[in-house]
Amino acid sequence: MADELKKLFPGVSYKLEDGSEVTVSPIPFGKLTVFSGAVTTIISKLQQEGLTEVNTADDIARAFEVAFEEVVQLMMLVMNQSREWFDTISTPDGLGLANIIVEQNFGEKTKKNAQALMEKFKAKAVNPA
């Protein structure tokens, strides 16, 4: 069963500055509601602060001021690591891991499938037969 999951959800190996390696895998579909809730919380906090775009180093710093703990909570969920573990990794490693998580879970294939599903829901709502 574990081998089947590895095939379905291939991970990305990431080498930390301390030399150890971790594997980051996309979230499984069964955790989608928890993951989506965490993402919604982050986006909501950023919007409340008027941060709708993150383009500069100042924007990134401000985004972390506003929603850092929520980002760490999301990463804990995806990577199944403790808060204490995140306190031991370097900033470049944390940012690198966050980047992998975004790439894996918000890629073009996910967007395309979500849009197709929404179109089918819309069509059924308009024409339920």
Image (cartoon, rainbow, N blue to C red):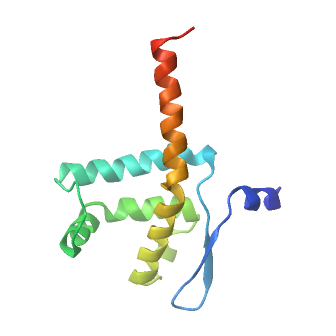
**On screen, residue 43 above or below 82:** above
Which residue is at the front of the view, 86 or 7? Answer: 7
Residue pictured at 22% horizontal, 54% vertical: 52
Residue pictured at 61% horizontal, 87% vertical: 20
Please provide percent x and percent y for residue 105. 52, 56
Left/right placement of residue 54 relative to residue 18 reads left
Please provide percent x and percent y for residue 111. 48, 47
Rendered image quadrant of residue 51:
bottom left
**Residue furthest top as drawn:** 129
Residue pictured at 37% horizontal, 59% vertical: 70
Please provide percent x and percent y for residue 94. 44, 76
Please provide percent x and percent y for residue 106. 48, 54
Q: Quadrant of the C terminus?
A: top right
Which residue is at the front of the view, 80 or 4? Answer: 4
Q: Quadrant of the N terminus?
A: bottom right
**On screen, residue 10 above or below 44:** below
Q: How many marks?
A: 0
Residue pictured at 61% horizontal, 77% vertical: 22
**On screen, residue 88 above or below 114:** below
**Residue furthest left as drawn:** 50
